[in-house]
Image (tube, rainbow, N blue to C red):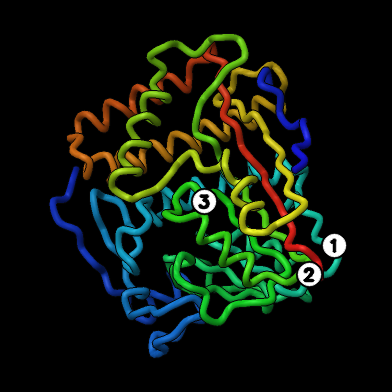
Amino acid sequence: MQEPTGGLPASSGMEENHLIEALTDEEMQNEATSDYDPGDEESRFGSVTSSVRGHVWEYGRRYHAFRYGRYYLPNDEGEYSREALRHTMLKDLLGGKLYAAPLGPNPQKIIDLGTGFGEWAIEIAEEFPSAKVIGVDLSPIQPHWLPPNVEFIVDDIEDEWAHADDFDYAHFRFVNTVLRDNDRMLRNVFQNIKPGGWVEIQDIYPRPASDDDTIPPDYALQRFYDISESVVRERYNVNMFVVDRLPQLLQDVGFVNVQRRVFHMPIGEWPRDRHLRLLGGLFREIMLEFVSAMAAKPLLEAGYDREEADEMVRDVTAALENRRIHAYMPIHFVWAQKPPV
């Protein structure tokens, strides 16, 4: 396994019950689109039901209804804003590119696993107009007007892949840290990708660090992650720190040419470098939206009351706005190839 060095330098009102909202056809057209037919009993990955056409409202936020509770973050406008900022930030890290893997000039079949609001899938489809691009997510939240080579499917990517194969490239972005079983997920990818095809994972290792010891012992963001890690591990069976193990997991299922690149992303506008300061500002907003989303549901379900959750958000906000704390978090880009025939 090669691990290229480089990247950004380190200096660089609670509702008691939920409401399932069934959308009308007109609302679905305005809200999202998918080629999924609710009359079909089989999808590409497993079985689905009419619950894909609804949303769940809890704690003042909107969540997916299909496989309710599988994914603990919302799918509303606040989450869209966070994902849009993250999309901009990750493209900037790659110099305007959407991927790090050496795809070649003509991939024909691409799958975006956990596509979210679909920005990445749409842009990769525009870059490769001859490729068929499939985005899969639990929520029907993707836009209605799409390039002709894009298809969105509402389904659970952790199901068996019953009718999906021969992909040239499989893409994950900030998904693996919310999966219950990365071993199984990567085996499914390996089985359904062409010989010589690529898989790429972009995700965060949620452990703030600094190179100048400016992080205090009681750093609010670290305290938040300690609490969140315990909550998602116990309630959702999720390993937030799986990113560090991904290269080995990829090798274990049979991938070769495994490579990893790690960026140290500043949290906040503390860097002197103008470009890093801009990225740090974006990342701070992304982190604050994430903390608010966690405080809206997972922490409350774990027994924290609203006042405690709000206090945690305030503490993290103050910490991330303190330019004397030169914190960063590692963002990993990992890619690997299925052995050619």
Asked whether, in this view, residue 104 is left or right of residue 44, the answer is right
Q: Residues within 10 Å of mark 1 (few under 14, many from 20)?
A: few
**Image height check: is 319 above or below 245?**
above
Mark 2 in CB contact with mark 1 (< 8 angstroms): yes
Give the x, y percent position of residue 337: 74, 58
| Residue 107: mark | 2
**Could you tell me which quadrant the N terminus lies in?**
top right
Amino acid type of the residue that numbered disc 1 sits on in the rendered structure: Gly
Asked whether, in this view, residue 97 is left or right of residue 52, the answer is right
* Residue that numbered label 1 is attached to: 104
x 83%, y 69%: residue:
106
Mark 2: secondary structure: loop
Q: Earlier in the sequence, mark 3 or mark 2?
A: 2
Mark 3 in CB contact with mark 2 (< 8 angstroms): no
Q: Residues within 10 Å of mark 2 (few under 14, many from 20)?
A: some
Instruction: Tell me how far mark 2 sits from mark 1, CA to CA.
Output: 7 Å
Instruction: Tell me how far mark 3 sits from mark 1, CA to CA.
Output: 25 Å
* Residue that numbered label 3 is attached to: 176
**Image height check: is 112 above or below 257?**
below
Amino acid type of the residue that numbered disc 2 sits on in the rendered structure: Pro
State the image quarter where residue 152 is shown: bottom right
Mark 3: secondary structure: helix
x 26%, y 58%: residue:
57
| Residue 251: mark | none
x 63%, y 72%: residue:
192
Q: Earlier in the sequence, mark 3 or mark 1?
A: 1
Give the x, y percent position of residue 147: 67, 74
Mark 1: secondary structure: loop
Q: For this rendering, which residue is in front, 173 or 182? A: 182
